[in-house]
């Protein structure tokens, strides 16, 4: 689920989750936005562990700080295995500094998203992500290649990288081989000539890269995944949505619909609303021109804020009436 900030994607995500649960699907809704509002919409306190809200419906808000700590703890444990004892204090100092470095939270969130996507979830039939997909998704798609480039740069500056260079051969796509083809594990004969420490490094790098490959394959599988954009009939949301749809479709990510939210109800009256409706009509026409190749369901502008299960169930009924 994605869209420009403030268009109502959290509300629509929550209503779709309620609808799916009412149909007997075991659903998990996950907020990956650091400025969480999912708990506010449900009027429930949420954290980074699934909480049962309704029969068949769990919800959680991934906490970026918690993910960073877990991510750095894993890295620190790996460094202790690979680094010499005299290097450990400096490595740990550098890792502490990275807690507030640009991109650290995003890297940790991406890894958590990738694990949720690529790991079988026997407790759920459906996972809904309340997030802006154009950033997260495109980064997930490019991470395997980025990791190979990063590793190559790292090894090129290592004077003693002859053995580790062999690892790189297994991290970099070979000419003529599909980037998504399975990678050999360090236990296969191709890595048998490496010493144990180097095989451990290879194992870590390969497993991490394989995780992002698996997530990418799930995202690109039309049978498993689909992105729903939410927008309002206004100029900037239309422009941003059109660009986002094009970006995702260019990398074979299925986009299932562009839901137009906060459409002025037909029975709203008054001169002010009449003028707003005339302007809205021009934007609805533009949405048809820009996104006419996608289904374009609509939700009306509501009289009140959205909070609590009762109003979410009403929105879910409106979504069901439009074919969801």
Image: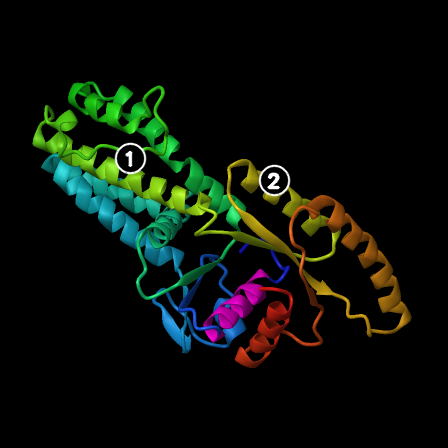
Q: Is residue 319 magenta?
A: no
In the image, taking residue 59 as reference, residue 231 lies left or right, namely right
Q: Residue at x 42, y 62 (%)?
A: 126
Taking 68 as reference, is 291 left or right?
right
In the displayed structure image, the side of residue 219 where residue 196 appears, left or right:
left
Q: Position of residue 13 (x, y in %)?
A: 53, 64
Q: Which residue is mark 2?
A: 246
The stretch in magenta equals 9-22
For the point 58% across and 60% down, which residue is it? 9
Residue occupying the point 82% across, 57% down? 281
Q: Quadrant of residue 258?
A: bottom right
Please count the marks in the image: 2
> Which quadrant: the C terminus?
bottom right
Sequence-wise first label, 1 or 2:
1
Q: Is residue 299 above or below residue 168?
A: below
> Any mark on residue 48, and which?
none
| Residue found 25% across the figure and 40% down from its top | 207
Residue that badge 1 annotates? 182
């Amino acid at each position: 689920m994605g869209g420009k900030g403030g268009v109502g994607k959290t509300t629509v995500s929550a209503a779709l989750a309620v609808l799916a649960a009412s149909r007997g699907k075991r659903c998990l809704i996950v907020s990956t936005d650091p400025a969480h509002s999912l708990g506010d919409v449900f009027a429930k306190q949420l954290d980074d562990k699934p909480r049962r809200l309704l029969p068949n419906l769990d919800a959680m808000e991934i906490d970026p700080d918690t993910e960073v700590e877990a991510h750095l703890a894993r890295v620190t444990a790996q460094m202790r295995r690979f680094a010499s004892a005299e290097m450990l204090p400096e490595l740990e100092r550098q890792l502490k500094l990275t807690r507030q470095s640009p991109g650290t939270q995003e890297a940790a969130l991406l890894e958590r998203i990738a694990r949720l996507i690529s790991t079988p979830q026997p407790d759920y039939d459906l996972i809904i992500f309340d997030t802006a997909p154009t950033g997260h998704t495109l980064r997930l798609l490019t991470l395997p290649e980025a990791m190979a480039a990063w590793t190559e740069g790292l090894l090129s500056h290592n004077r003693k990288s002859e053995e580790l260079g062999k690892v790189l051969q297994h991290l970099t796509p070979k000419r003529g081989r599909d980037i998504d083809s399975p990678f050999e594990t360090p236990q296969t004969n191709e890595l048998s000539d490496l010493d144990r420490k180097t095989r451990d490094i290879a194992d870590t790098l390969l497993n991490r890269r394989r995780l992002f490959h698996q997530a990418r394959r799930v995202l690109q599988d039309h049978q498993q995944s689909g992105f729903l954009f939410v927008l309002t009939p206004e100029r900037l949301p239309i422009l941003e949505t059109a660009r986002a749809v094009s970006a995702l479709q260019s990398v074979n990510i299925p986009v299932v619909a562009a839901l137009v939210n906060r459409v002025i109800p037909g029975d709203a009256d008054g001169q002010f609303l009449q003028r707003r409706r005339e302007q809205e009509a021009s934007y609805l026409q533009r949405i048809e021109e820009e996104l006419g190749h996608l289904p374009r369901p609509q939700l009306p502008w509501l009289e009140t804020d959205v909070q609590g299960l009762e109003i979410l169930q009403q929105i879910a009924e409106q979504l069901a009436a439009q074919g969801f």
